[in-house]
Amino acid sequence: METPSLGQATIVSGLHHTVDDGLRIPERIESGSDPGILFELAGPREKIFFDPAKTRAGIVTCGGLCPGLNNVIRSLFLELHYGYGIAEVLGFRGGYAGLDPANGAEPATITPEYIEGIHRQGGTILGTSRGPVDIERAVDNLIRRGVNILFTVGGDGTQRGANALYQEARRRNHPLSVVGVPKTIDNDVGFVARTFGYFSAVEEAVRVLDRAHTEARSTPGGIGLVKLMGRHAGFITAGATIASQDVNFALIPEVPFRLDSFLEALEKRMRQKTHAVIAVAEGAGQELLECGEGAKDASGNLMLKDIGLFLKGQIERHFKEVGVPVVMRYFDPSYLVRSCPANCEDALLCDLFARHAVHAAMAGKTGVVIGFLHERFIHVPIELLAVHVKRLDPDSGWWRSVLAATGQPDCSV
Ligand SMILES: Nc1ncnc2c1ncn2[C@@H]1O[C@H](COP(=O)(O)OP(=O)(O)O)[C@@H](O)[C@H]1O
Ligand SMILES: O=P(O)(O)OC[C@H]1O[C@](O)(COP(=O)(O)O)[C@@H](O)[C@@H]1O
């Protein structure tokens, strides 16, 4: 087996490196003018860097839950174990905290028995967490345990952590391949057209919208208000709105709205019709809430103010003032939506992301995340993810479909 030096496969430019099978890929075809970036296509390579008999791999899952995490763990293991004959695969427990032995959790040794049936369960069998880890101690531990490959399954925060781990291992000359598998129900990771778990979350969200619609239309003056996840991006709210076709107002972070315009439009509808359904992404309308210096979670993410409860209060107050009786039904299915198992579409996506991650690692790629654009899996340098986020473009077909499905007026003026 030929073993190129890890240096050869290390990203030095901040962009792609050894492009053996590159393709210039625009992120959005719709925009037309995007010149694209030359990405390396992911997939199995003829030459691999790691000797399977001497290689130990690790898997860690971080950040919020997402349907399909267990599918990814399972497919990573299956490809490593049966595809490449890797000797040992460790599962670090409880997110990045599990990389530091000071936190006490021994990693699991993943076996075929360990992963049996896990893909039918939501959550992650390894556990997850938010919050920092001491990078030097984590890399000490990886070296001590002889781990040469680490799969970091997580969102942009996780991949920033992965970048720090890869840089530290490189500084120490430890041949560590760090390969990220992008995870978020929010679907807002750059260079990934569709993150795994997104469609499962949308499916769950549609179920709740359906219930909200049933409640609202069964009561004269019924208003079903549903708050959905989506910290910075409205993909879940938009996707669920389009799929459900029962939503009358969709509010997302990328499209600011004026409270008075929204209330006026809702009042107009309630005077003409018997009911209304509103879907609001948790990151929408944050500018309307009393903010100040917001609190942060353990990972440093700004914690959002509750737009759902705020809107509920404002709607009730407004209709009381104008003397129109309404019956408010409020739903907050956030954790319900993301803790379900993956649906079939996501299960397939998880498997492909995982297998491409293993091929990348075995070929000696490091500091890369598996991207997915235009139905092609690609190697995205981790640093690129940090500077590039994906948001729902209000000029896109997505938003036009939302407007067509809801018939909502422009509430930004
Ligand atoms: N800049 C960073 N450097 C190192 N680790 C980070 C960084 N940002 C986030 N992390 C770590 O990555 C993990 C997951 O991050 P978080 O933001 O909670 O979720 P996600 O990966 O889904 O965005 C946490 O343990 C967090 O401390
Ligand atoms: O788990 P927490 O801390 O309540 O976080 C909720 C956040 O997690 C998400 O579901 C996904 O966020 P991450 O992908 O960053 O983990 C967001 O939509 C939501 O704002």
Image (cartoon, helix red, strand yellow):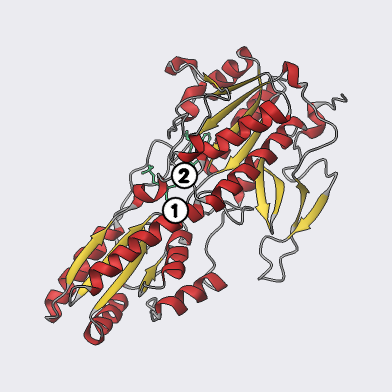
Q: Which residue is mark 1?
A: 201
Q: Amino acid at mark 1?
A: Ala
- Quadrant of the image occupied by residue 280: bottom left
> Where does residue 249 sit, x and y in percent of width and height?
36, 73
In this rendering, the count of numbered labels is: 2
Q: Secondary structure at mark 2?
A: loop
Assign the N terminus to one quadrant of the image.
top right
The residue that appears at 75% across and 63% down in the rendered structure is: 35
Rendered view: 35 above or below 72: below
- Does the residue tagged 2 have its C-beta within 8 Å of any atom of ligand 2? yes
Residue that carries the numbered disc 2 in the rendered image: 66
User: As shown in the figure, which amino acid type bears the numbered disc 2?
Assistant: Cys
Residue at the farthest right position: 2
Quick one: SS at disc 1?
A: helix
Q: Residues within 10 Å of mark 2 (few under 14, many from 20)?
A: many
Q: Contact (CB < 8 A) between labels 1 and 2?
A: yes
- Residue in the image at 26% along x and 84% along y: 268
At x 74% / y 46%, what residue is drawn?
15
